[in-house]
Image: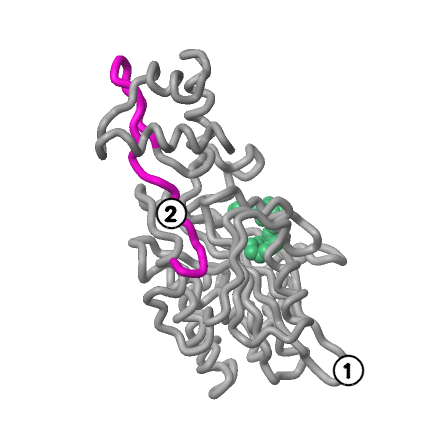
């Protein structure tokens, strides 16, 4: 907006690290001194970090880091993934755009990223909270030549790549909760949504949506998520570059996807089991048809969860929410 432009201009006229007084800001914008903080808050919401010091005024500590096509592609080490980047500041859902692009023939490895999603999607028409500049909201288009019933393996594959990427750029130890959650210290930091377009002749495309809370602060989460969600910044106490994490993630994803195409699911299964929190523990699986309690034995070669109830009967769980 106009006010925002003027504000940023006022700050850019000051020497780096210098404070701009409230009085000066009020004059530049043409507002009262008491209204200045409101405009400063708006800048904060736009991803700027600002210091406010009494009697000195305000200064910009850092401008928002974006995840534009350029930020992602400079220094990207992949062969295919991320060679096509569709970037938007605000979208309803990156999945929606990726589906359209896939229909229009987009190549494998095309990604859609946004700074903000206003109706981000989870599974079963749940919503995914995606506030501006705080996380990675990304969808990637894959075109694997595999039978339709193998598609859920791709969720597990993506989860492994996310864990590896987070491990590489942070000092946290993420774990996987079957099938699609990644947790740090027991709280959800990432959700994965795998959707596909298929007809009787097979899979046309698989769209993997990945949402990672990166620089989210506690206050950015709505109340109902505060207890169960977390971010990389909350867990390690400092922010990281989202663009860098996307680059590392794309590289990991491409590597593990190639491994999968060449060797099948079993090497992925092994990696996955090394990160899983669920295995060997007592869990509650809530499926569309009911609830089953028991011990998680592991996953099958197909990626299906095996759960042994207290009568010793083993259930195959294809899709569920798990609580520990
Ligand atoms: C998921 O669903 O976890 C899949 C999330 C996929 C999001 C990505 S972002 C890029 C792409 N574009 C989209 O529109 N979606 C994908 P599910 O397992 O159903 O979990 C959804 C539940 O997680 C919600 O009902 C909340 O309880 C919780 N939740 C919502 N937003 C969250 C967040 N930012 N962090 C942690 N938990 C969240």
Residue under circle 2? 65
Q: Earlier in the sequence, mark 2 or mark 1?
A: 2
- Neighbour tally class for label 2: few under 14, some 14-19, many 20 plus, Cα within 10 Å: some
Which of 263/299 is in front? 263
Vertical side of 117 occupied by 268: above or below: below
Q: CA distance from mark 2 to mark 1?
A: 44 Å
Dot 1: element: loop
Does residue 218 appear left or right of residue 76 in this picture?
right
Q: Residue at x 49, y 31 (%)?
A: 2
Say whether residue 286 is left or right of residue 250. right
* Image point (40%, 61%), residue name: 72
The residue under label 1 is: 200
The residue lying furthest to the bottom in this view is 262
Occupied quadrant, residue 296: bottom right
Asked if one can make out residue 311 in the rendered structure from this viewpoint, the answer is: yes
Residue 315 can be seen, yes or no? no
Q: Which residues are magenta?
A: 50-71
Q: Is residue 62 left or right of residue 86?
A: left
Q: Nearer the viewer, residue 260 or 284?
A: 260
Residue 221, relative to residue 80: is it above or below? above
Residue 68 is one of the magenta-drawn residues = yes
| Left or right, residue 139 beside residue 239 | right
In this view of the protein, which residue sits in the foreground, 298 or 8?
A: 8
């Amino acid at each position: 907006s106009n006010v925002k432009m003027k504000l940023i201009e006022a700050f850019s006229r000051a020497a780096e690290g210098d404070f701009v007084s409230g009085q000066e800001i009020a004059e530049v914008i043409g507002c009262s001194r008491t209204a200045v903080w409101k405009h400063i808050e708006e800048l904060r919401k736009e991803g700027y970090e600002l210091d406010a010091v009494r009697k000195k005024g305000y200064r910009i500590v850092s401008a928002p880091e974006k995840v534009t096509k350029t930020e992602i592609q400079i220094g990207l080490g992949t062969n295919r993934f991320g060679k096509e980047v569709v970037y938007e500041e605000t979208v309803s859902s990156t999945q929606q755009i990726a589906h359209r692009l896939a229909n229009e023939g987009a190549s494998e490895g095309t990604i859609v990223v946004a700074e903000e999603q206003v109706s981000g999607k989870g599974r079963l028409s749940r919503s995914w909270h995606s506030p501006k500049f705080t996380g990675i909201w990304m969808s990637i288009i894959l075109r694997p030549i595999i039978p339709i019933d193998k598609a859920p393996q791709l969720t597990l594959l993506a989860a492994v790549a996310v864990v590896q990427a987070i491990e590489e750029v942070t000092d946290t130890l993420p774990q996987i909760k079957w099938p699609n959650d990644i947790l740090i210290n027991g709280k959800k930091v990432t959700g994965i949504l795998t959707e596909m377009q298929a007809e009787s002749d097979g899979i046309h495309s698989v769209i993997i949506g990945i949402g990672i809370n990166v620089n989210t602060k506690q206050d950015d989460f709505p109340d109902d998520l505060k207890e169960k969600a977390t971010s990389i910044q909350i867990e390690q106490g400092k922010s990281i570059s989202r663009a860098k994490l996307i680059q590392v993630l794309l590289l990991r994803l491409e590597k593990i996807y190639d491994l999968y195409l060449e060797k099948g699911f079993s090497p992925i299964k092994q990696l996955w089991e090394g990160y899983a929190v669920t295995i060997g523990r007592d869990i509650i699986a809530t499926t569309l048809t009911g609830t089953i309690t028991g011990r998680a034995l592991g996953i099958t070669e197909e990626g299906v969860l095996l759960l042994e109830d207290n009568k010793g009967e083993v259930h195959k769980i294809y899709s569920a929410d798990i609580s520990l």
